[in-house]
Image (spheres, rainbow, N blue to C red):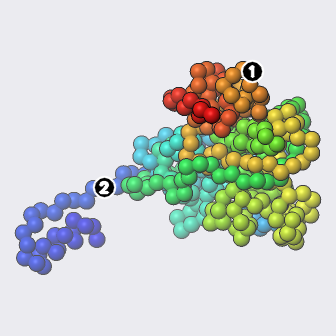
Amino acid sequence: MKWATATALLGIASGLALGPATPAAADPPASSWSADLRQGEAAGVVIDDGVARIDPQTAFVAAAEGAPADGTARPTGLLTFPAHRLATATDHVAVAVDGEVPAGATATVDVRGRRATGGWTEWVPAASGPGGRAVTLPAASAEVQARLVLAGDPAAGPVVRGVSLTARPAPPGRTESDERALALSYRVFATREGLVGGKTANGHVIGDHDHFVALPSRRALSPRGSSDYSVKVCASGRCAFAPVWDVGPWNTRDDYWNPGSKRQEWRDLPQGVPQAQAAHDDGYNGGRDQYDREVSNPAGIDLGDGLFWDALGLENNAWVDVEYLWTGAERLARVASDTDVRAAPDGAAEVVGVAAGHASVPVECAHGGWLRVGPDQYVEAGAIPDAPHIGACPPPATP
């Protein structure tokens, strides 16, 4: 019963003269659109005769969405569509996939929304519900993006002809439920990725001394060449900023930085503890990963060779401190090309790390031609051409 009708009935029962009832305002209409397969950025997917298929030459291997924790790894490909602007902010997007999906294969859709800080929420896989498959975003957003995820035997399918989406307007006042002022930070074990000449999960060809990282969940996988999800990794007094361009090590559905209520798998583990660490150190899951492999090290992050050797000066796998920069409310800005991080706003100051090209960094304040991106960490302003408008850094404290 609408409020206006209920009020009119109350007036009759009490003998009050309320005047004519005001009709309730109509809800804004839902917005529907179809993704153009030809406009998507493909990584492990090929468009052939207007349909999307797994590309066996470039697909990466991962467990399918919704498969058991010990599910078989299958060739997987991603097709990331351009962002879509909406007239009204949404927090609920229904998705439909048109195609053939044989037994043992999957064709799913991930969706994310633009946050108030300018960054993106993590990718959220569509889940089955009474009205079909849909995504509930953590915050209302007027800009959303979708990506198609194909997994299975490339020779047998899946084959997808189209993807359609419908965004429902968000309730007034809907805000992010777990927004944090500062990014999450955990100490985890890091390994060197290597694999020069191979391709990452987002389609990047790994170069010699490359600057990127891998995390064991595609929920924070940046599209190729982007800085949408970046980390700050520190060890032995040096720090490196780098984008997340690959999935691993060990697992592919372990977003361990998230609390148990949001974590995709292994929800009984403490927040910030990778499943591989619990398996290696405590015998969790029988000491095995999601593929039933015996875990030989506790790694929660892989580092490209350039980060491992050059930026952090590591010689062996090591424990590092990681900030998952997209999880905070700080506004981030993209680094145009690899640049040194110095201990002071001076070209002669000690180099204390590297900000990789395509990484996002938190720009705190300006000091002449320098930008502060952390405590005693500065980069030249020219390395971040689209830095936000910021104030001057406070003068150093007088001894």
Examine the image and state in which quarter residue 373 appears.
top right
At horizontal 85% and vertical 69% (from top left) the residue drawn is 282
Q: Is residue 17 above or below residue 369?
A: below
Residue 315 position within the rendered picture, expressed as x and y whole percent measured from the top left: 92, 41
Residue 7 position within the rendered picture, expressed as x and y whole percent measured from the top left: 19, 70
Examine the image and state in which quarter residue 48 appears.
top right
Residue 189 position within the rendered picture, expressed as x and y whole percent measured from the top left: 83, 53
Apparent side of residue 153 relative to residue 177 in the rendered image (left or right): right
Tell me the quadrant of the picture where the C terminus can be found. Answer: top right
Give amino acid for label 2.
Ala
Residue 253 position within the rendered picture, expressed as x and y whole percent measured from the top left: 74, 58
At horizontal 77% and vertical 43% (from top left) the residue drawn is 234
Q: Which mark is residue 348?
A: 1
Give amino acid for label 1.
Ala
The answer to whether residue 184 of the structure is visible from this angle is yes
Q: Is residue 353 above or below residue 168?
A: above
Q: Nearer the viewer, residue 120 or 85?
A: 120
Q: Mark 2 — residue? A: 26
The answer to whether residue 213 of the structure is visible from this angle is no
Q: Nearer the viewer, residue 175 or 377?
A: 377
